Image: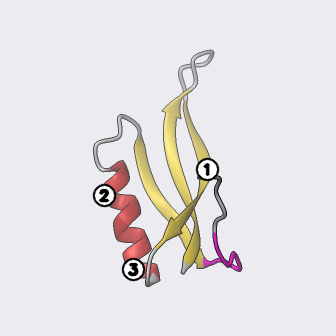
Amino acid sequence: MYYIAKVKFETVDDNTGRIKKVYEQYIVDAETISEAEEILNDRFRDSIAECAVASVQESKIMGIVTRR
């Protein structure tokens, strides 16, 4: 099952020096929402920027098709 997750990052704006919140979306292949959150937390654990999983929801995506 695929989940769409929003991850919030805090970065420093180069122009103003202020902390800026940036949201990015990721597709996560997992069995449950809890597993998707765990995968994301593991992925970004050593990130330079402060980050947190803002939301995870089930996706309507049926699969991912790639060229081999």
Q: Residue at image x 57%, y 17%?
A: 14
Quadrant showing the N terminus: bottom right
Q: How is the image coloured?
A: secondary structure
Q: Which residue is mark 3?
A: 34
The residue type indicated by label 1 comes to Tyr
- Give the image location of residue 37, x and y in percent: 41, 70
**Disc 1 element:** strand
Q: Is residue 26 above or below residue 29?
A: above
In this orientation, which residue lies closer to the viewer: 33 or 60?
60
Find the distance from the CA under tag 1 to the CA under tag 2: 18 Å
Residue depth check, mark 1 versus mark 3: number of the one nearer the observer: 3
Q: Which residue is mark 2?
A: 42
Q: Residue 20 colored magenta? A: no
Looking at the image, is mark 2 or mark 3 earlier in the sequence?
A: 3
- What's drawn in magenta, residue-wise? 58-63
Q: Residue at image x 49%, y 41%?
A: 10
The residue type indicated by label 2 comes to Asp
